[in-house]
Image (cartoon, rainbow, N blue to C red):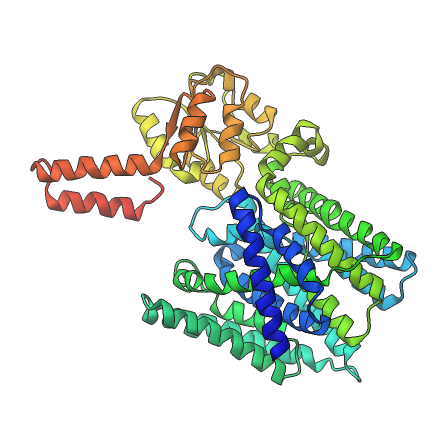
């Protein structure tokens, strides 16, 4: 107990000091967490570190489960399962083959294949906090793929527990784990929604409920002889209700995330050792698989499945980090004495390297996508556009509308009153089906593609209206080589000033528009020009149709 308390104290003291430096310089925190871990590793016993890392990973798996928008996973479920399974199976097979070619034993080759195949980006999971109804397609796809790979991770953990670590094969563990997961699904569907409805507004009790679930399921898993990560995964499923019912729980467990995230990253840094030549060789191969092969396969499969290049690339970039499940499996294997020391060192080093890279790719994903497109990478994969386009040959003086789901219906209605034709450019296949029914002119594809703008007849257009809340997409519109006026959406005043200086003809600032509308409505109400019933009706209509 003393060792755990000493380790925790040292971790948080070092992390706090270094994060102070990061905050003052405006630098990403992950490198400082890893550096804090390297310093802590000189003073902390490895056994305590391994135990702490396992618990940190288990709680992060639980927190990921809470944040998952299961409705979003269901909407992209078939695609996510297919893409995640194809990528993991293909890279896993290549990894096992490479491990055997490196001279590893069969079990070590399996560990190597698992490390190469299971990817995620804990650094990039900030998108999971955005649980609103409108999120970019790549975020929903990434969430679905991550969830699929977590399920595969659970299956690997169970397989190792049943057939490698057990004195005699114990396939019944799969049935027990299935029962625990079935219990979690039953609680989610039959109990949790009612519980959150009753406890709404009581954040302290909600947090206790969340903690009780994860501890209870971990205890149940341990009592059944299963890994704690299986229990944590089941607990996440049990309390991951559909938006917005679990929103309050998500808010209350953020403090837990702030507690366990530094533990995870710092312990990874603490487990780093000076690698030998053998470990360096394994590390190079693993880093290449995680940073290059996995995103490439995901992007290729998505593009071939009909998604545009931008969505495919941004989704692929979220699988650029060694998975937390991989680390858990490696730590378990080290404790059981079934993994070669150089391979364990390589997995930890690969995790640290990919974490650092993911810090960059998360911040600059849009720029990376544009860089790849400019060099023909997306075209090489076969970016589809032509088969989902309808544009009249005589279309001119039209409004080009981007990101229909963020208020496009209002623009369509306004243009209809002005008898102005509208062409919609969209890259979300789910929204695109609605657009087909609502619009006469449309182009499906990535706005970074010159061909999309050619098909949208940009030079004949009257104006481009971008409703996207994503800054990199707005910047793409501003960077178009055209004299056609462009209006873009912004979410902060600094961005508005910057975009106007860069040549935007106008900006849409939803907060300012909303405040102005409230002011107009209040003026009309107080002046007697509008009745209270009309005021309520306007508010109700806006609530019922947030997109307008």
Q: Quadrant of residue 410?
A: top left
In the rendered view, tell whether residue 59 sits above or below residue 147. Answer: below
Q: Quadrant of residue 401?
A: top left
Quadrant in which the N terminus appears: bottom right
Callout count: 0
- Left or right: residue 537 compared with residue 72: left
Residue reaching furthest left? 528
Q: Residue at x 49, y 31 (%)?
A: 474
Q: Nearer the viewer, residue 482 or 43?
A: 43
Q: Residue at x 89, y 62 (%)?
A: 104
- Left or right: residue 511 compared with residue 355: left
- Left or right: residue 257 compared with residue 467: right
Q: Residue at x 52, y 41 (%)?
A: 428
The answer to whether residue 471 of the structure is visible from this angle is yes
Quadrant in which the C terminus appears: top left
In the rendered view, tell whether residue 165 sits above or below residue 546. Answer: below
Q: Nearer the viewer, residue 131 or 443?
A: 131
Percent x, y for residue 521?
18, 38
Q: Nearer the viewer, residue 26 or 184?
A: 26
In the rendered view, tell whether residue 250 sits above or below residue 461. Answer: below
Percent x, y for residue 53?
65, 67
In the rendered view, tell whether residue 31 sits above or below residue 519. Answer: below
Percent x, y for residue 222?
62, 81
Percent x, y for residue 431?
48, 42
The answer to whether residue 58 of the structure is visible from this angle is no
Q: Quadrant of residue 308?
A: top right
């Amino acid at each position: 107990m003393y060792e755990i308390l000493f380790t925790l104290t040292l971790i948080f003291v070092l992390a706090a000091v270094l994060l102070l430096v990061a905050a003052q310089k405006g630098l990403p925190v992950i490198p400082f967490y890893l550096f804090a871990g390297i310093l802590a590793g000189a003073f902390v016993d490895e056994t305590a570190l391994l135990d702490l890392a396992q618990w940190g990973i288990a709680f992060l798996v639980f927190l990921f489960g809470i944040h998952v928008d299961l409705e979003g996973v269901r909407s992209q479920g078939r695609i996510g399962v297919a893409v995640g399974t194809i990528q993991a199976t293909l890279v896993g097979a290549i990894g096992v083959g490479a491990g055997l070619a490196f001279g590893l034993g069969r079990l070590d080759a399996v560990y190597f294949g698992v490390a190469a195949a299971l990817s995620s980006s804990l650094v990039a999971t900030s998108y999971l906090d955005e649980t609103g109804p409108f999120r970019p397609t790549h975020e929903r796809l990434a969430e679905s793929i991550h969830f699929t790979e977590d399920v595969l991770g659970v299956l690997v953990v169970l397989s190792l527990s049943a057939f490698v670590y057990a004195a005699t094969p114990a396939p019944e563990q799969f049935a027990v784990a299935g029962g625990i997961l079935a219990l979690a699904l039953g609680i989610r569907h039959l109990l949790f929604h009612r519980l959150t409805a009753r406890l709404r507004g009581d954040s302290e009790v909600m947090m206790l409920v969340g903690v009780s679930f994860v501890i209870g399921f971990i205890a149940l898993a341990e009592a059944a002889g299963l890994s704690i990560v299986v229990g944590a995964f089941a607990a996440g499923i049990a309390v991951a209700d559909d938006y917005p019912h679990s929103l309050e729980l998500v808010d209350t467990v953020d403090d837990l995330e702030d507690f366990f995230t530094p533990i995870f990253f710092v312990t990874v840094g603490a487990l780093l050792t000076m690698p030998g030549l053998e470990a360096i060789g394994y590390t190079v191969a693993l880093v290449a698989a995680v940073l290059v092969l996995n995103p490439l396969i995901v992007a290729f499969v998505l593009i071939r499945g009909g998604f545009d290049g931008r969505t495919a690339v941004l989704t692929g970039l979220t699988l650029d980090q060694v998975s937390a499940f991989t680390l858990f499996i490696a730590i378990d294997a080290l404790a059981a004495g079934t993994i070669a020391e150089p391979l364990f060192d390589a997995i930890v080093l690969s995790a640290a390297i990919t974490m650092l890279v993911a810090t960059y790719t998360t911040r600059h994903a849009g720029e990376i996508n544009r860089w790849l497109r400019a060099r023909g990478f997306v075209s090489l994969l076969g970016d589809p556009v032509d088969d989902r386009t309808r544009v009249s040959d005589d279309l001119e003086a039209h409004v080009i509308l981007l990101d229909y789901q963020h208020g496009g219906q209002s623009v369509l209605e306004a243009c209809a009153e002005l008898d102005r034709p509208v062409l919609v450019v969209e890259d979300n296949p789910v929204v695109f089906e609605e657009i087909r029914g609502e619009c006469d002119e449309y182009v499906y594809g990535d706005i970074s593609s010159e061909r999309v703008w050619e098909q949208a007849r940009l030079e004949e257009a009257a104006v481009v209206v971008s409703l996207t809340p994503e800054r990199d997409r707005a910047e793409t519109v501003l960077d178009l080589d055209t004299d056609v006026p462009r209006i873009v959406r912004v979410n902060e005043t600094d961005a508005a000033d910057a975009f106007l200086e860069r040549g935007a003809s106008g900006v849409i600032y939803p907060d300012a528009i909303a405040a102005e509308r409230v002011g107009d409505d209040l003026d009309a109400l107080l002046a007697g020009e509008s009745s209270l019933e009309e005021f309520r009706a306007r508010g109700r209509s806006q609530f019922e149709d947030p997109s307008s």
